[in-house]
Amino acid sequence: MTHSPQVECNRGATAALSNRIRWSYGAGSLFTSIYGTLPQVVLLYYMTSQLGIPAAVGGVVLFLPKLVEIFVDPAIGLFSDRLRTRWGRRRPLMAAGTLGFLLAFPFLFHPPHLDSPMQYAAFTAAVFTVATFFYSLFFVPYLALPAEMTAQPSERTMLMGLRIGFLSLGVMIAGAGAPLLIAAGGGGMSGYALMNWAYAAVCVAAMTLAWVGTIGAPESERRLAPGHLLLQLRSALNNRPFAYLASAYSLQAAAMGCFSAALPYFVVHSLAAAPSTGGLIFLAVTGTSLLMMVPWILLGNRVGKHRCYYFAAVTYGVFSLLQVASGATTPLWQVLLIFVFAGVGFAGVQLFSHALLPDTTVLDRTLTGANREALFSGIWISAEKLGFAGGALLAGALLQIGGLVPATGGPLQAQPESAVLAIRALIAVVPAVLLALSLPLIRRSERSAVLAGLSVPATAKV
């Protein structure tokens, strides 16, 4: 059965979006980035330093809930694509995700008193699973909105630029602010509880603004593809530009997962610095990312998204490797300067991987005539979670192999040299290798997009 290549949408999809819709949509990424960052940066260190959980078990706690969600996210996407309500097919799920997240997330770092580290591990895994489900219930339909709100590539670029800007801001707030909030709460379990409730309030506010502020946005004509979930998944993955892009994004997420999980250990045991120094490092990376967003967009419009991704990934990888030599005698300004240059690459990698996603979903709608944006979003988020979870699992395994010694109710004690070497590898070497592995996948995505008529090599714009 063949379909017309024409993309069908309502009249509003060709008009410029209002600033209210643009900024409200972008603000939703404040939530997704905070929740995406906080467990990756803090949770493993929290489990090993406060709950006495071994590093390998902590890695499994981070991995298993997201493994479950990998299968849930595409189902949420397909359900959203087929939902019919008077409020549309995206915002009701976003609203439900907001309410559920409010009820679950505050207990992630604020558990009841339990008798053993394994009980704490089971409780943390259960809360993390529930909170991540409601995160997906919001994020999957949220990520589908740009491809259906507008048919203009330039308008989608504006939405993605705002989204990545808020994403970088959220990463900065979570990564730089968490150590300060923990210290403000007196450290220990009380400090983590204060941090937990503070970020819960910010996340729920951003989620609410995203679904309330985009009310009245255009919505593409509702045309459904037939078939059950497995058939739809197989069909979606036959979109080669998308399949290769999602695979590359999963490796990118794994690189960030390793880096984030290892950062608190790197600050304390490699740099021999105060935990709050981790906030400065996050500020260096994400602050630079915010400043580089507009230059990357301009460069992408000039030379193309794919080329910019290659350059950004290489930039991040090179400066990441320089941190192998960082230690207690390395001046802090030198460490921060290296991370500033790494932030230049981080901004480009984040922007161009996300900027390419709506193009692949528009290609699918053009070729099939069906609206499956949320299904693609679900697969994309699954790839992200698989990457982050795999990175955290790898971090826990390498720390365990390195001989990291956990603690209960206080900071970790001095670690053996083998553990410090594992920490440096997770900060510098592993992320660089994973990003290098993503480059041939991006190249294949580019070539298959050209064959499908989606873009022209060297001139494809953001």
Image (cartoon, grey):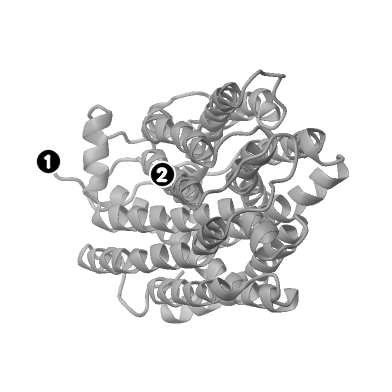
| Camera-side mark, 1 or 2 | 2
Rendering coords of residue 351 (x, y %): 51, 64
Please report the residue visible at 54 percent of the width from the left and 23 percent of the height from the top.
122
Residue 52 makes an appearance in the image:
yes
Residue named by callout 2: 386
Viewer-closest of 70 and 136: 70
What is the distance, in whole Å, between disc 1 and disc 2 at their CAs?
A: 34 Å
Q: Is residue 219 above or below residue 340?
A: above
Secondary structure of residue under mark 1: loop
- Asked if residue 124 lies left or right of residue 433, the reply is right
Secondary structure of residue under mark 2: helix
Tag shown at residue 179: none
Residue named by callout 1: 1
Crowding at dot 2, Cα within 10 Å, few <14 / some 14-19 / many 20+, comes out as many
Viewer-closest of 227 and 282: 282
For marks 1 and 2 on the same chain, the one whose residue lies earlier in the sequence: 1
Viewer-closest of 368 and 71: 71
Please report the residue visible at 29 percent of the width from the left and 68 percent of the height from the top.
440
- Image quadrant assignment for residue 409: top right
Crowding at dot 1, Cα within 10 Å, few <14 / some 14-19 / many 20+, comes out as few
Rendering coords of residue 139 (x, y %): 53, 39
Question: What residue type is disc 1 on?
Answer: Met
CB-based contact (under 8 Å), mark 1 and mark 2: no
Residue 152 makes an appearance in the image:
no
- Image quadrant assignment for residue 171: bottom right
Q: Is residue 298 above or below residue 23?
A: below
